[in-house]
Amino acid sequence: MIDTAVLIPAYDEEPRIATVLDVVCSMDGLSILVIDDGSTDATAERALQYPVGVLRHRRNEGKGAALESGIIHVERARSWVFLDADLIGLRREHISRLLRPLQEDPGMGMTVGQFVQGTKRVDWAQRFFSILNGQRALSDAFVRSLPGLWWSRFGVEVFLSRFAEHNGWTVGEPYLEGLTHHTKEAKMGAARGVRARLNMYRECLSALARWENHLSEERKTELLPDECEVLRAVDGKGAN
Ligand SMILES: Nc1nc2c(ncn2[C@@H]2O[C@H](COP(=O)(O)OP(=O)(O)OP(=O)(O)O)[C@@H](O)[C@H]2O)c(=O)[nH]1
Ligand SMILES: [Mg+2]
């Protein structure tokens, strides 16, 4: 079985994804999978230059759908890591920090990384931000227990956190010092970036208001070839 599966959902991250892949590919024991969610640029081709598995959605289906495709493809892993493709300042230590609480406490379902830039106080804004943070490690038992995520788009993080709380899973919040990410405005320019940000907030608020409606959402059981191409299978898949 795969030891640690790293899922990296990516949409139009061709200029940025190499920075993340340089770090994760330098670590032992990780099976890495990039899910290109119908990008309009060469995100998938860039990822294929690395020793990682690559899936490509034929259309843009949203972050939650990309993670669900990744889970279906990998099938089983002892632990799971979700990472964004646009991180700045990622170090190996950040991955270890996400995973360590799961290794130390078998009852822990998930860790949610918290970006800290030298400010010590964890104020309300940071706590709210922490529920949106995409840098997470998850136990296999927690991943097995998840319902379908296809519907959730940018609400996926809100849903994962609410689902964990609802079902009594312990959740850790390790600090990830010096880690940050590109904003939408930096990636897309001011006008498109603000529109995309408002859309993301709408999807997050929708998940916040309606997460309970999705607790028994059916999980997809297979990747349909007209929705998702396997450009390269993830390393270690099918091994015992
Ligand atoms: N699968 C998928 N991933 C997406 C989509 N949009 C963005 N992502 C990925 O999700 C991660 C976070 O997306 P961002 O748009 O940077 O959002 P954010 O970092 O949460 O928020 P800001 O940067 O503050 O706007 C990155 O890895 C993106 O490539 C999408 O439509 N589908
Ligand atoms: Mg970002």
Image (cartoon, rainbow, N blue to C red):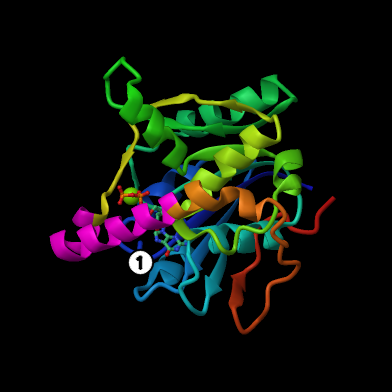
Going by the picture, which residue comes out furthest to the bottom? 226
Residue in front for this viewpoint, 100 or 236: 100
* 127 up-or-down from 163: above or below: above
Give SS at disc 1: loop
Query: Label 1: few (<14), some or many (≥20) within 10 Å?
Result: many
Give the image location of residue 115, x and y in percent: 36, 31
Residue in front for this viewpoint, 177 or 59: 59
Q: Mark 1 points at which residue?
A: 12
Q: What residue type is labelled 1?
A: Asp
Q: Does the magenta stretch include residue 3?
A: no
Query: Magenta region's main secondary structure?
Result: helix
At x 20% / y 54%, what residue is drawn?
Answer: 186
Q: In this view, does 182 lie to the left or right of 40?
A: left
User: In the image, ligand 1 is in what quadrant?
Assistant: bottom left
Answer yes or no: disc 1 within 8 Å of ligand 1. Answer: yes
Magenta range is 185-205
Q: Residue 239 is drawn in which quadrant?
A: bottom right
At x 27% / y 19%, what residue is drawn?
Answer: 119
Q: In this view, does 180 lie to the left or right of 45?
A: left
Residue in front for this viewpoint, 2 or 12: 12
Q: Is residue 187 magenta?
A: yes
At x 35% / y 61%, what residue is drawn?
Answer: 13
At x 46% / y 37%, what residue is drawn?
Answer: 131
* 130 up-or-down from 189: above or below: above
Can see residue 230? yes
Going by the picture, which residue comes out furthest to the right? 240
